[in-house]
Amino acid sequence: MDYKDLDVVLNKLNTDKKSTEMQLNHNQDKITSLIRHKELTEEDARLVLNKLCKDGYAEFMIKNNDRYYYINYDGIEFLAQNGYAEKLRLQNLRDKSIRMGSRLKLIVGIGSVIVGSYYFLLLLREFVFPLFCCYH
């Protein structure tokens, strides 16, 4: 299971905008068809649907002892922003930015040590070594 499965199922839940009851029955059939066509195992579908509910993009209701999943407003908005694929892309960009920032700090730190050492040696040469030279 990966982010693509999450996007596929969320898109399936989003396709029919009729009355809630019709939408629920229609979407339940779509989830069942995903399982039937081996795109997802039943276990994967359950995990995906639970993840979508946990993330706040889908909800469920129980009718006649069956659980019907449906997309909520946050889920529709999330899909409009390209869903989990975009979320993953942005997370990767953030991670890369953090890594680059860390490297930059390391480079600046090393450069500061080198420059500081250089000026310290200049100070030593200018003020300390002339004292020793005068006694000769």
Image (cartoon, rainbow, N blue to C red):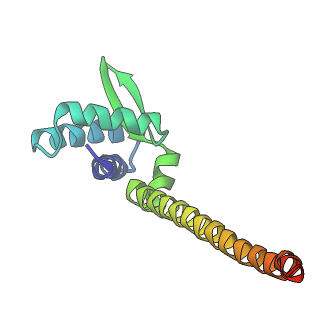
Locate the N terminus and report the quarter of the image it occupies: top left
95 relative to 112, above or below: above
25 relative to 98, above or below: above
The percent position of residue 103, horizontal first and vertical second, equals: 54, 65
What residue sits 40% from the left and 53% below the top?
Answer: 84
The percent position of residue 10, horizontal first and vertical second, equals: 35, 48
Q: Nearer the viewer, residue 107 or 73?
A: 107
Q: Nearer the viewer, residue 29 or 89?
A: 89
Location of residue 62 by image quarter: top left
Q: In the drawing, does residue 67 fall left or right of residue 111?
A: left
The percent position of residue 108, horizontal first and vertical second, equals: 64, 70
- How many labels sit on residues? 0
What residue sits 29% from the left and 47% below the top?
Answer: 2
Q: Nearer the viewer, residue 100 or 50?
A: 100
Q: In the drawing, does residue 49 fall left or right of residue 57?
A: left
What residue sits 84% from the left and 76% below the top?
Answer: 132
Residue most toward the front? 136
Location of residue 85 by image quarter: bottom left
The percent position of residue 31, horizontal first and vertical second, equals: 23, 40
Location of residue 41 by image quarter: top left
Locate the C terminus and report the quarter of the image it occupies: bottom right
Q: In the drawing, does residue 136 fall left or right of residue 14?
A: right
12 relative to 85, above or below: above
Q: Nearer the viewer, residue 90 or 20?
A: 90
Residue most toward the left? 37
